[in-house]
Amino acid sequence: MMNNKKGFVLTEVILMIMVIGLALMMISGQNKKALDKVSVILENAGDSQWSALKYGLKMAAEEEGIELAVVDVEEGLDAEAQKKVFEREIEDGADALIVQPVLDKNDQEVLKKIEKRVPVMLVGYEAEKGETRYDLPVIKEDNYEMGQALAEEMLKDFEGNIEEKKIGLLLPYTDADESCSVLKSEGKVEPYFKDALEDKNANILELSLDSLLNREENTESKVDIVIALDDSNLTAIGEYLASSQPHGELLYGIGQSTEAIYYLDKGIAECVVVPDEFNVGYQSLSEVARKLDHYFENMKKQTVSYSVIRKETLFSKENQELLLTMSQ
């Protein structure tokens, strides 16, 4: 009889432990925090120029426990179209936004309103501080240093003497694209490249890509040196030079895609300045994650580094990691 009683008590104890354990598991499951979701808005997100940036985003998201969504949008969306994208992402559960497209003042007004609901981080371009005094956080390239470095590399090849050379400067935006005007001057490479040549009596022509590609019909567009200030122009003119009869131009530029590196490796480009887009992605996601964990802390603005690469240094040890991030 005593043994039966002991067995009954033991069974009760075991059942009680199981019930308590099950209850704790249920409570834990209910209290477990869902992953924060961050939506990253990129123009032409599938383009290889974003490979390193997306790899940086992915690495930071894995470390921070963030659900990452990369959203592809068409180039040149107006403020209303971008607003719809932002609103849709928030409705779909985004806790924060990382935004790449170049912003005009209307876009900035939209984002300042969005920022009251979720954290917003810009990448690549800093919002204009005009009368409205917008101050959105940004992770961006060091355009001053890149512009100076590109000019210095070109000057090295001519031993500083470029007085008789015509330099065709391909701007990131055509004159028809007024969105360029809303960026802060320090958000563009162009003035810093020109500043480095101020005392060199350089003959600089600002050209559109179309005018340069159609130079057979427009002799004024014939130049000795081509300077491409963004990846899209660099790869476009690289493709053109690779497939056409040589005209003797030397190509220098800023780029971060595998295509840009390909044209460097083939000797079509003399030098490519490569911004550290991996860190643009990594740092932007890390800052947003910190903001989500500490709501009252402000996100920090940061500037990333760059590398100057020539064909002879392309596969050097210090460039291997950079090339790896670009090929992801």
Image: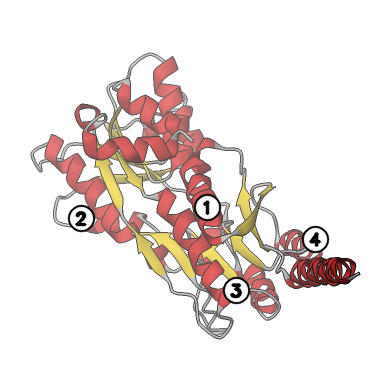
* Mark count: 4
Residue 294, compared with residue 37, is above or below; it is below
Can you identify the residue that label 4 sits on?
Answer: 92
User: Alpha-carbon distance for marks 2 and 1?
Assistant: 34 Å
Camera-side mark, 3 or 2: 3
Element type at mark 2 = helix
Quadrant assignment, res 79: bottom right
The residue depicted at 68 percent of the width and 81 percent of the height is 116
Q: What residue type is labelled 3?
A: Leu
Q: Position of residue 216 (x, y in %)?
A: 44, 22
Q: State which tag comes first along the sequence, 3 or 4.
A: 4
Q: Do the residues labelled 2 and 1 touch (CB within 8 Å)?
A: no
Q: Where is residue 89 in the image (x, y as percent from the top left)?
A: 75, 61
Q: State which tag comes first along the sequence, 2 or 1.
A: 1
Element type at mark 3 = helix
| In the foreground, 263 or 76 | 263
Can you identify the residue that label 3 sits on?
Answer: 292
Element type at mark 1 = helix
Q: What residue type is labelled 1?
A: Leu
Residue 284, compared with residue 222, is above or below; it is below
Can you identify the residue that label 1 sits on?
Answer: 57
User: Alpha-carbon distance for marks 2 and 4?
Assistant: 47 Å
Quadrant in which the N terminus is drawn: bottom right
